Image (cartoon, rainbow, N blue to C red):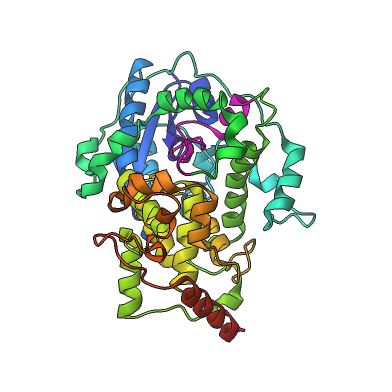
Protein backbone atom coordinates (compact mmCIF):
# COMPACT_ATOMS: atom_id res chain seq x y z
CA UNK A 1 0.00 0.00 0.00
CA UNK A 2 1.30 3.52 -0.76
CA UNK A 3 2.34 5.73 2.12
CA UNK A 4 -0.64 7.33 3.87
CA UNK A 5 -1.29 11.05 3.73
CA UNK A 6 -2.46 13.41 6.45
CA UNK A 7 -5.64 15.48 6.10
CA UNK A 8 -5.20 18.60 8.26
CA UNK A 9 -8.58 19.95 9.34
CA UNK A 10 -9.13 23.41 10.77
CA UNK A 11 -12.20 25.54 10.03
CA UNK A 12 -13.42 23.02 7.44
CA UNK A 13 -15.09 20.35 9.55
CA UNK A 14 -17.02 18.55 6.82
CA UNK A 15 -16.85 15.73 4.31
CA UNK A 16 -19.08 17.32 1.66
CA UNK A 17 -17.33 19.71 -0.77
CA UNK A 18 -13.95 19.12 0.87
CA UNK A 19 -11.28 19.43 -1.86
CA UNK A 20 -8.44 18.53 0.53
CA UNK A 21 -10.21 15.30 1.50
CA UNK A 22 -10.92 14.46 -2.15
CA UNK A 23 -7.25 14.93 -3.08
CA UNK A 24 -6.07 12.94 -0.07
CA UNK A 25 -8.51 10.08 -0.74
CA UNK A 26 -7.30 9.87 -4.34
CA UNK A 27 -3.76 9.12 -3.13
CA UNK A 28 -4.60 6.20 -0.85
CA UNK A 29 -4.91 5.84 2.91
CA UNK A 30 -5.97 9.02 4.73
CA UNK A 31 -5.29 10.03 8.35
CA UNK A 32 -7.64 12.94 9.22
CA UNK A 33 -6.15 15.15 11.92
CA UNK A 34 -7.44 18.08 13.94
CA UNK A 35 -4.77 19.99 15.87
CA UNK A 36 -5.85 22.20 18.76
CA UNK A 37 -3.20 24.91 18.48
CA UNK A 38 -3.44 27.56 21.18
CA UNK A 39 0.20 28.59 20.90
CA UNK A 40 0.26 29.75 17.27
CA UNK A 41 -2.73 32.11 17.47
CA UNK A 42 -1.59 33.50 20.83
CA UNK A 43 -4.19 35.99 22.02
CA UNK A 44 -6.34 34.93 19.07
CA UNK A 45 -6.74 31.33 20.22
CA UNK A 46 -10.38 30.41 19.88
CA UNK A 47 -12.71 31.86 22.50
CA UNK A 48 -14.99 30.13 24.96
CA UNK A 49 -18.12 30.05 22.81
CA UNK A 50 -16.23 28.71 19.80
CA UNK A 51 -14.74 25.98 21.99
CA UNK A 52 -18.23 24.82 22.90
CA UNK A 53 -19.14 24.61 19.21
CA UNK A 54 -15.84 22.95 18.32
CA UNK A 55 -16.36 20.17 20.89
CA UNK A 56 -19.71 19.22 19.40
CA UNK A 57 -18.66 19.74 15.78
CA UNK A 58 -15.62 17.46 16.20
CA UNK A 59 -17.89 14.87 17.81
CA UNK A 60 -20.18 14.96 14.77
CA UNK A 61 -17.25 14.85 12.34
CA UNK A 62 -15.72 11.89 14.16
CA UNK A 63 -18.98 9.96 13.78
CA UNK A 64 -19.23 10.87 10.08
CA UNK A 65 -15.68 9.61 9.48
CA UNK A 66 -16.39 6.42 11.43
CA UNK A 67 -19.36 5.76 9.16
CA UNK A 68 -16.86 5.85 6.29
CA UNK A 69 -14.52 3.40 7.99
CA UNK A 70 -12.14 6.16 9.00
CA UNK A 71 -11.48 8.07 12.21
CA UNK A 72 -10.45 11.52 13.45
CA UNK A 73 -7.09 11.90 15.15
CA UNK A 74 -6.90 14.64 17.77
CA UNK A 75 -3.56 16.21 18.74
CA UNK A 76 -2.70 19.35 20.68
CA UNK A 77 0.23 21.74 20.31
CA UNK A 78 1.88 24.01 17.71
CA UNK A 79 0.27 22.86 14.48
CA UNK A 80 3.33 22.67 12.24
CA UNK A 81 5.36 20.74 14.83
CA UNK A 82 2.51 18.34 15.58
CA UNK A 83 2.02 17.60 11.89
CA UNK A 84 5.73 17.13 11.23
CA UNK A 85 5.87 14.71 14.16
CA UNK A 86 2.89 12.83 12.72
CA UNK A 87 4.54 12.63 9.30
CA UNK A 88 7.55 10.96 10.89
CA UNK A 89 5.44 8.77 13.19
CA UNK A 90 3.14 7.43 10.47
CA UNK A 91 5.41 7.48 7.47
CA UNK A 92 2.92 9.73 5.71
CA UNK A 93 4.17 11.34 2.52
CA UNK A 94 2.45 14.71 2.69
CA UNK A 95 -0.24 16.87 4.34
CA UNK A 96 -3.38 17.97 2.46
CA UNK A 97 -5.32 20.97 3.78
CA UNK A 98 -7.62 23.80 2.75
CA UNK A 99 -6.01 27.23 2.49
CA UNK A 100 -6.67 29.63 5.39
CA UNK A 101 -5.97 33.37 5.66
CA UNK A 102 -5.61 34.06 9.38
CA UNK A 103 -2.00 35.17 9.97
CA UNK A 104 -1.19 32.37 12.42
CA UNK A 105 -2.40 29.71 9.97
CA UNK A 106 -0.41 31.24 7.15
CA UNK A 107 2.67 31.09 9.38
CA UNK A 108 2.03 27.40 10.12
CA UNK A 109 1.49 26.68 6.42
CA UNK A 110 4.80 28.36 5.57
CA UNK A 111 6.58 26.34 8.27
CA UNK A 112 5.35 23.06 6.78
CA UNK A 113 6.83 24.04 3.41
CA UNK A 114 6.93 21.38 0.71
CA UNK A 115 5.28 18.80 2.94
CA UNK A 116 1.99 20.70 2.61
CA UNK A 117 -0.38 20.56 -0.36
CA UNK A 118 -2.94 23.37 -0.11
CA UNK A 119 -6.35 23.47 -1.78
CA UNK A 120 -9.00 26.15 -2.17
CA UNK A 121 -12.34 25.42 -0.58
CA UNK A 122 -13.33 27.90 2.12
CA UNK A 123 -14.00 30.89 -0.13
CA UNK A 124 -16.08 31.56 -3.23
CA UNK A 125 -12.88 32.31 -5.16
CA UNK A 126 -9.13 32.26 -4.61
CA UNK A 127 -8.51 35.51 -2.72
CA UNK A 128 -5.10 36.06 -4.31
CA UNK A 129 -6.75 36.15 -7.73
CA UNK A 130 -9.36 38.81 -6.87
CA UNK A 131 -7.07 41.83 -6.88
CA UNK A 132 -6.74 45.42 -7.96
CA UNK A 133 -5.02 46.41 -11.18
CA UNK A 134 -1.73 46.52 -9.28
CA UNK A 135 -2.25 43.00 -7.97
CA UNK A 136 -3.06 44.00 -4.38
CA UNK A 137 -6.03 42.74 -2.35
CA UNK A 138 -9.02 45.09 -2.36
CA UNK A 139 -9.65 47.33 0.61
CA UNK A 140 -13.07 48.57 -0.54
CA UNK A 141 -15.89 46.06 -0.66
CA UNK A 142 -17.83 47.56 -3.56
CA UNK A 143 -14.75 47.31 -5.78
CA UNK A 144 -14.08 43.78 -4.54
CA UNK A 145 -17.63 42.68 -5.35
CA UNK A 146 -17.32 44.09 -8.87
CA UNK A 147 -14.03 42.29 -9.49
CA UNK A 148 -15.34 39.06 -7.99
CA UNK A 149 -17.91 38.77 -10.78
CA UNK A 150 -15.21 37.50 -13.12
CA UNK A 151 -14.80 34.46 -10.84
CA UNK A 152 -18.48 33.69 -10.34
CA UNK A 153 -20.38 31.52 -10.10
CA UNK A 154 -18.10 29.28 -8.05
CA UNK A 155 -17.61 25.67 -9.08
CA UNK A 156 -20.32 23.22 -8.11
CA UNK A 157 -19.77 21.60 -4.71
CA UNK A 158 -18.09 18.20 -4.74
CA UNK A 159 -19.75 15.10 -3.26
CA UNK A 160 -18.35 13.13 -0.35
CA UNK A 161 -15.78 10.55 -1.51
CA UNK A 162 -17.34 7.11 -1.77
CA UNK A 163 -14.45 5.55 0.10
CA UNK A 164 -11.84 6.85 2.52
CA UNK A 165 -9.10 4.27 2.85
CA UNK A 166 -7.72 3.63 6.32
CA UNK A 167 -4.01 3.23 7.11
CA UNK A 168 -2.57 -0.09 8.26
CA UNK A 169 -1.96 1.45 11.67
CA UNK A 170 -3.65 4.41 13.31
CA UNK A 171 -1.60 6.86 15.41
CA UNK A 172 -2.61 7.59 18.98
CA UNK A 173 -5.21 10.27 19.55
CA UNK A 174 -6.26 12.58 22.36
CA UNK A 175 -9.88 12.54 23.44
CA UNK A 176 -12.17 15.56 23.47
CA UNK A 177 -12.53 15.10 27.22
CA UNK A 178 -8.76 15.57 27.51
CA UNK A 179 -9.11 18.99 25.91
CA UNK A 180 -11.80 20.36 28.23
CA UNK A 181 -13.37 22.48 25.51
CA UNK A 182 -16.74 22.83 27.20
CA UNK A 183 -16.56 26.09 29.19
CA UNK A 184 -17.06 26.16 32.92
CA UNK A 185 -19.29 29.22 32.51
CA UNK A 186 -23.00 29.45 33.14
CA UNK A 187 -23.92 30.70 29.66
CA UNK A 188 -22.90 27.64 27.72
CA UNK A 189 -25.63 25.53 29.33
CA UNK A 190 -28.17 27.35 27.15
CA UNK A 191 -26.30 26.95 23.87
CA UNK A 192 -27.79 23.51 23.21
CA UNK A 193 -31.25 25.08 23.30
CA UNK A 194 -30.24 27.40 20.46
CA UNK A 195 -28.00 25.28 18.26
CA UNK A 196 -27.47 21.88 16.74
CA UNK A 197 -23.93 21.57 15.45
CA UNK A 198 -22.44 19.50 12.66
CA UNK A 199 -22.45 19.09 8.90
CA UNK A 200 -25.81 17.33 8.70
CA UNK A 201 -27.56 20.18 10.49
CA UNK A 202 -25.80 22.75 8.29
CA UNK A 203 -27.05 21.08 5.13
CA UNK A 204 -30.61 20.80 6.48
CA UNK A 205 -30.61 24.42 7.58
CA UNK A 206 -29.27 25.59 4.21
CA UNK A 207 -32.12 23.82 2.39
CA UNK A 208 -34.68 25.37 4.74
CA UNK A 209 -33.24 28.84 4.27
CA UNK A 210 -33.22 28.49 0.48
CA UNK A 211 -37.02 28.21 0.62
CA UNK A 212 -37.31 31.62 2.25
CA UNK A 213 -34.32 33.47 0.80
CA UNK A 214 -36.70 35.65 -1.23
CA UNK A 215 -37.66 37.39 2.02
CA UNK A 216 -34.07 37.84 3.19
CA UNK A 217 -33.45 41.39 2.00
CA UNK A 218 -36.75 42.68 3.37
CA UNK A 219 -36.60 40.95 6.77
CA UNK A 220 -32.90 40.54 7.60
CA UNK A 221 -32.85 43.78 9.63
CA UNK A 222 -35.85 42.90 11.81
CA UNK A 223 -34.50 41.26 14.96
CA UNK A 224 -37.92 40.09 16.17
CA UNK A 225 -38.29 37.95 13.02
CA UNK A 226 -36.40 34.90 11.78
CA UNK A 227 -35.17 36.84 8.76
CA UNK A 228 -31.52 35.81 8.70
CA UNK A 229 -30.08 32.44 7.72
CA UNK A 230 -28.46 31.69 11.12
CA UNK A 231 -25.88 29.76 9.13
CA UNK A 232 -22.87 31.86 10.17
CA UNK A 233 -21.59 29.43 12.86
CA UNK A 234 -21.82 26.49 10.46
CA UNK A 235 -20.03 28.50 7.77
CA UNK A 236 -17.37 29.73 10.20
CA UNK A 237 -16.50 26.23 11.40
CA UNK A 238 -16.61 24.93 7.85
CA UNK A 239 -19.50 22.52 8.39
CA UNK A 240 -20.75 23.80 5.04
CA UNK A 241 -18.79 25.54 2.29
CA UNK A 242 -19.43 29.01 0.90
CA UNK A 243 -19.89 27.64 -2.60
CA UNK A 244 -22.41 25.04 -1.38
CA UNK A 245 -24.39 27.88 0.18
CA UNK A 246 -24.07 29.92 -3.02
CA UNK A 247 -25.52 27.11 -5.09
CA UNK A 248 -28.17 26.24 -2.48
CA UNK A 249 -30.10 29.33 -3.64
CA UNK A 250 -29.70 28.74 -7.37
CA UNK A 251 -32.88 29.63 -9.20
CA UNK A 252 -34.04 32.05 -6.52
CA UNK A 253 -34.42 35.50 -8.16
CA UNK A 254 -33.99 37.44 -4.90
CA UNK A 255 -30.82 35.73 -3.65
CA UNK A 256 -28.31 38.46 -4.55
CA UNK A 257 -28.30 40.18 -1.15
CA UNK A 258 -27.55 36.90 0.58
CA UNK A 259 -24.83 36.12 -1.92
CA UNK A 260 -23.27 39.52 -1.31
CA UNK A 261 -23.05 38.62 2.38
CA UNK A 262 -21.19 35.45 1.44
CA UNK A 263 -18.86 37.57 -0.70
CA UNK A 264 -18.28 39.92 2.26
CA UNK A 265 -16.59 37.02 4.06
CA UNK A 266 -14.21 36.62 1.11
CA UNK A 267 -13.54 40.34 1.22
CA UNK A 268 -12.61 40.25 4.91
CA UNK A 269 -10.19 37.40 4.19
CA UNK A 270 -8.55 39.67 1.62
CA UNK A 271 -8.26 42.49 4.14
CA UNK A 272 -6.49 40.26 6.65
CA UNK A 273 -4.26 38.91 3.89
CA UNK A 274 -3.17 42.47 3.11
CA UNK A 275 -3.18 43.64 6.74
CA UNK A 276 -2.50 40.64 9.02
CA UNK A 277 -2.66 42.77 12.19
CA UNK A 278 -6.09 44.16 11.38
CA UNK A 279 -7.50 42.68 14.57
CA UNK A 280 -5.09 44.83 16.60
CA UNK A 281 -4.22 47.89 14.54
CA UNK A 282 -6.40 50.70 13.22
CA UNK A 283 -6.86 50.44 9.48
CA UNK A 284 -6.51 54.22 9.34
CA UNK A 285 -3.38 55.19 11.31
CA UNK A 286 -4.80 58.67 11.96
CA UNK A 287 -7.09 57.06 14.55
CA UNK A 288 -4.07 56.10 16.62
CA UNK A 289 -4.42 59.65 17.95
CA UNK A 290 -8.04 59.22 19.06
CA UNK A 291 -8.28 59.35 22.84
CA UNK A 292 -10.58 56.56 23.94
CA UNK A 293 -11.96 56.72 27.48
CA UNK A 294 -10.08 54.71 30.08
CA UNK A 295 -10.16 54.41 33.87
CA UNK A 296 -12.67 53.19 36.44
CA UNK A 297 -15.70 55.00 35.02
CA UNK A 298 -15.02 53.69 31.51
CA UNK A 299 -14.47 50.18 32.90
CA UNK A 300 -17.80 50.33 34.69
CA UNK A 301 -19.53 51.47 31.49
CA UNK A 302 -17.89 48.67 29.53
CA UNK A 303 -19.06 46.08 32.04
CA UNK A 304 -22.60 47.49 31.91
CA UNK A 305 -22.45 47.11 28.12
CA UNK A 306 -21.19 43.51 28.40
CA UNK A 307 -23.95 42.63 30.84
CA UNK A 308 -26.77 44.34 28.94
CA UNK A 309 -27.36 46.95 31.66
CA UNK A 310 -26.93 50.22 29.74
CA UNK A 311 -30.53 51.47 30.04
CA UNK A 312 -30.93 51.32 26.25
CA UNK A 313 -33.36 48.43 25.64
CA UNK A 314 -32.22 47.58 22.12
CA UNK A 315 -28.55 47.52 23.17
CA UNK A 316 -29.26 45.45 26.27
CA UNK A 317 -31.39 42.96 24.34
CA UNK A 318 -28.56 42.38 21.87
CA UNK A 319 -25.92 41.91 24.54
CA UNK A 320 -28.09 39.49 26.48
CA UNK A 321 -28.87 37.49 23.37
CA UNK A 322 -25.12 37.25 22.77
CA UNK A 323 -24.41 36.02 26.29
CA UNK A 324 -27.25 33.51 26.31
CA UNK A 325 -26.96 32.02 22.82
CA UNK A 326 -23.43 32.81 21.59
CA UNK A 327 -24.90 34.73 18.67
CA UNK A 328 -26.39 38.13 17.95
CA UNK A 329 -28.57 39.42 15.15
CA UNK A 330 -26.45 41.34 12.62
CA UNK A 331 -28.37 44.62 12.97
CA UNK A 332 -27.80 44.40 16.71
CA UNK A 333 -24.08 43.76 16.21
CA UNK A 334 -23.86 47.14 14.48
CA UNK A 335 -26.02 48.94 17.05
CA UNK A 336 -24.16 47.55 20.07
CA UNK A 337 -20.76 48.18 18.50
CA UNK A 338 -21.69 51.76 17.66
CA UNK A 339 -22.94 52.31 21.20
CA UNK A 340 -19.67 51.10 22.72
CA UNK A 341 -17.37 53.04 20.42
CA UNK A 342 -19.41 56.23 20.04
CA UNK A 343 -21.78 56.71 22.99
CA UNK A 344 -19.30 55.27 25.50
CA UNK A 345 -16.14 56.23 23.55
CA UNK A 346 -14.49 52.92 24.43
CA UNK A 347 -11.84 51.40 22.17
CA UNK A 348 -13.29 49.09 19.51
CA UNK A 349 -10.72 46.45 20.45
CA UNK A 350 -12.40 45.94 23.84
CA UNK A 351 -15.67 45.11 22.09
CA UNK A 352 -13.93 43.01 19.47
CA UNK A 353 -12.31 40.87 22.18
CA UNK A 354 -15.65 40.44 23.99
CA UNK A 355 -17.31 39.27 20.78
CA UNK A 356 -14.35 36.97 20.13
CA UNK A 357 -14.96 35.15 23.39
CA UNK A 358 -18.77 35.15 23.29
CA UNK A 359 -19.64 34.46 19.64
CA UNK A 360 -19.89 30.90 18.34
CA UNK A 361 -19.15 32.35 14.88
CA UNK A 362 -16.27 34.64 15.89
CA UNK A 363 -14.20 34.95 12.72
CA UNK A 364 -10.92 36.89 12.72
CA UNK A 365 -11.56 38.63 9.41
CA UNK A 366 -15.25 39.28 9.90
CA UNK A 367 -14.93 40.34 13.52
CA UNK A 368 -12.08 42.80 12.98
CA UNK A 369 -13.38 44.27 9.70
CA UNK A 370 -16.91 44.69 11.05
CA UNK A 371 -15.77 46.35 14.27
CA UNK A 372 -13.52 48.75 12.39
CA UNK A 373 -16.32 49.45 9.91
CA UNK A 374 -18.62 50.56 12.71
CA UNK A 375 -15.91 52.38 14.66
CA UNK A 376 -14.81 54.33 11.59
CA UNK A 377 -11.18 53.29 12.02
CA UNK A 378 -11.02 50.82 9.14
CA UNK A 379 -9.87 50.93 5.53
CA UNK A 380 -13.46 50.60 4.28
CA UNK A 381 -15.57 52.10 7.04
CA UNK A 382 -18.21 54.61 7.96
CA UNK A 383 -17.04 58.05 8.98
CA UNK A 384 -16.47 58.24 12.73
CA UNK A 385 -19.14 60.93 12.87
CA UNK A 386 -21.79 58.44 11.78
CA UNK A 387 -23.33 57.54 15.13
CA UNK A 388 -26.26 55.15 15.25
CA UNK A 389 -29.16 56.40 17.37
CA UNK A 390 -30.15 53.22 19.24
CA UNK A 391 -33.57 54.49 20.30
CA UNK A 392 -34.68 55.39 16.79
CA UNK A 393 -33.04 52.23 15.39
CA UNK A 394 -35.14 50.21 17.82
CA UNK A 395 -38.37 51.79 16.62
CA UNK A 396 -37.37 51.75 12.93
CA UNK A 397 -36.69 48.02 12.96
CA UNK A 398 -39.71 47.12 15.11
CA UNK A 399 -37.68 45.60 17.92
CA UNK A 400 -40.39 45.60 20.60
CA UNK A 401 -40.96 41.84 20.75
CA UNK A 402 -37.22 41.20 20.49
CA UNK A 403 -36.64 43.43 23.54
CA UNK A 404 -39.40 41.74 25.51
CA UNK A 405 -37.80 38.37 24.87
CA UNK A 406 -34.30 39.28 26.00
CA UNK A 407 -35.03 41.97 28.60
CA UNK A 408 -37.80 40.42 30.73
CA UNK A 409 -37.90 43.45 33.05
CA UNK A 410 -39.56 45.26 30.14
CA UNK A 411 -41.97 42.48 29.15
CA UNK A 412 -44.98 44.49 30.27
CA UNK A 413 -44.02 47.76 28.57
CA UNK A 414 -46.09 48.36 25.40
CA UNK A 415 -45.04 49.87 22.11
CA UNK A 416 -43.91 52.55 21.49
CA UNK A 417 -42.73 53.16 25.07
CA UNK A 418 -40.59 50.02 25.12
CA UNK A 419 -38.02 51.62 22.84
CA UNK A 420 -37.31 54.31 25.47
CA UNK A 421 -39.21 53.57 28.69
CA UNK A 422 -37.19 56.16 30.63
CA UNK A 423 -38.31 58.96 28.34
CA UNK A 424 -41.87 57.61 28.36
CA UNK A 425 -41.91 57.70 32.17
CA UNK A 426 -42.57 53.97 32.60
CA UNK A 427 -39.14 52.51 33.30
CA UNK A 428 -39.54 49.61 35.75
CA UNK A 429 -37.48 49.89 38.93
CA UNK A 430 -35.67 46.65 38.05
CA UNK A 431 -34.37 48.13 34.79
CA UNK A 432 -31.36 50.49 34.93
CA UNK A 433 -31.41 54.14 33.95
CA UNK A 434 -29.37 55.15 30.93
CA UNK A 435 -25.67 55.24 31.69
CA UNK A 436 -25.25 58.13 29.24
CA UNK A 437 -27.66 60.37 27.39
CA UNK A 438 -27.83 60.04 23.62
CA UNK A 439 -26.96 63.71 23.02
CA UNK A 440 -24.24 63.66 25.68
CA UNK A 441 -22.60 60.55 24.23
CA UNK A 442 -22.84 61.84 20.68
CA UNK A 443 -21.30 65.21 21.50
CA UNK A 444 -18.49 63.59 23.49
CA UNK A 445 -17.63 61.33 20.55
CA UNK A 446 -17.65 64.20 18.05
CA UNK A 447 -15.44 66.27 20.37
CA UNK A 448 -12.94 63.40 20.59
CA UNK A 449 -12.85 63.11 16.80
CA UNK A 450 -12.33 66.88 16.45
CA UNK A 451 -9.49 66.82 18.98
CA UNK A 452 -7.84 63.96 17.07
CA UNK A 453 -7.72 66.05 13.91
Is the N terminus in the top left, top right, bottom left or bottom right quadrant?
Answer: top left
**Residue 79 visible in image:** yes
Q: Position of residue 409 (x, y in %)?
A: 28, 53
Q: Quadrant of residue 182?
A: top left
Residue 246 falls within the magenta-colored stretch? yes
Tell whether 400 sits left or right of 49: right
Q: Horizontally, is 215 left or right of 328 in the view?
A: right
User: What's the residue at 37%, 57% (across, down)?
Assistant: 316
Q: Is residue 337 above or below residue 246?
A: below
Where is residue 295 shown, x and y percent of the image?
33, 81
Residue 289 is a magenta residue: no
Vertical placement of residue 409 versus 228, above or below: below
Residue 107 visible in the displayed image? no
Specify start and end residues of the magenta stretch as a single range.
Answer: 223-249
Residue plotted at (23% across, 35% down):
175
Q: Quadrant of the image for the C terminus?
A: bottom right
Residue at 41%, 43% (x, y): give it: 401
Amino acid sequence: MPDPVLLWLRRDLRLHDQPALIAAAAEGAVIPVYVLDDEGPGEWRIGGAQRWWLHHSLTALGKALADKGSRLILRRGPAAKVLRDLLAETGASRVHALRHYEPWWRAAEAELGDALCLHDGNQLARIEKVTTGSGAPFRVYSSFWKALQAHLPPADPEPVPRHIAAPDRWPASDTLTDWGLLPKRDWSDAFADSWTTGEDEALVKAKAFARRVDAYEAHRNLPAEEGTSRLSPHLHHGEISARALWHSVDGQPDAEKFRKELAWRDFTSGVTLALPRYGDDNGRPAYDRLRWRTGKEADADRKAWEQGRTGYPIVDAGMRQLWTTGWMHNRLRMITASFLTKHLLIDWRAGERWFWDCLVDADYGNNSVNWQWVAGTGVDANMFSRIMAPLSQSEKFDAGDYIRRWVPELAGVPDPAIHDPEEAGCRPAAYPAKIVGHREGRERALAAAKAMR
